[in-house]
Image (cartoon, rainbow, N blue to C red):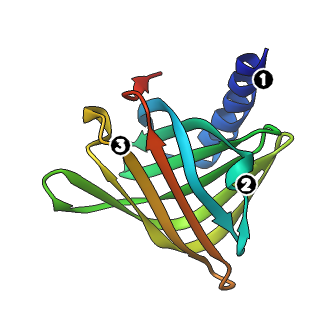
Amino acid sequence: MQAKGFLASLAVLMLAGASAQSAPLEDMGIAKGVCEKFSIAGKPTTKECTGKLLNTTYADGRVGFYFTFKRGSIITFSGYDRPNPTKDTDLISVDKIIFSVGGATREFAATGSCRYGNFRAGHKRVTCKGSSDDGQPFEAVFRMTSPPEPM
């Protein structure tokens, strides 16, 4: 039952994102694991974060990390791919945060980054950090317990 709710929320989110995103979706994967840390606007919400993380990549280089929460909401850190700091590390510049709650979606401008190992090779952590344009900090750390699966 919980998986059906998650997939329904995900479908709504992807349809909403598809209308706002002009580039075609190239890749989508889901990882299971542990949300080790999550705070937004200085409020820790780690206990509400679930063990699922979605990743999307669009043809124009936009990447999104979708953190899911127990009550069905989703918070996405989205931005563009940057040059890799090392051969085994990827980096995106976050330029927006997207909140999806109960079918409603709101976007906020942001500055920050998400760093992750070769996602498809199963490296363990995704770390996002930065702040919204009004100065509210965000930080998220997700540790995968199994390799990401394509969707």
In the rendered structure, find residue 99 and report the number of the disc placed on it. Answer: 2
Q: Disc 1 or 3, which lies upstream in sequence? A: 1
Asked if residue 23 shows in the view, the reply is no
Residue 6 in which image quadrant: top right
User: With respect to residue 44, does 112 lie above or below?
Assistant: below
Quadrant location, the N terminus = top right
Asked if residue 125 shows in the view, the reply is yes
- The amino acid beneath tag 1 is Gly
> Residue farthest to the right?
102
Rendered residue at 43%/67% (across/down): 113
Residue 71 in which image quadrant: top right
Query: Residue 25 versus residue 39: which sits nearer the camera?
Result: 39
Q: Secondary structure at mark 2?
A: strand
Q: Badge 3 is on which residue?
A: 124
Q: Is residue 8 left or right of residue 116?
A: right
Question: How far from the left and from the top, in percent, is residue 114?
Answer: 42, 61
Question: How far from the left and from the top, in percent, is residue 14?
Answer: 63, 35
In the rendered structure, find residue 5 and report the number of the disc placed on it. Answer: 1
Separation of disc 1 and disc 3 at Cα?
26 Å
How crowded pointer 3 is (Cα within 10 Å; few <14, some 14-19, many 20+) is rated as some
Rendered residue at 67%/54% (across/down): 46
Q: Is residue 43 left or right of residue 56?
A: right
- The amino acid beneath tag 2 is Phe
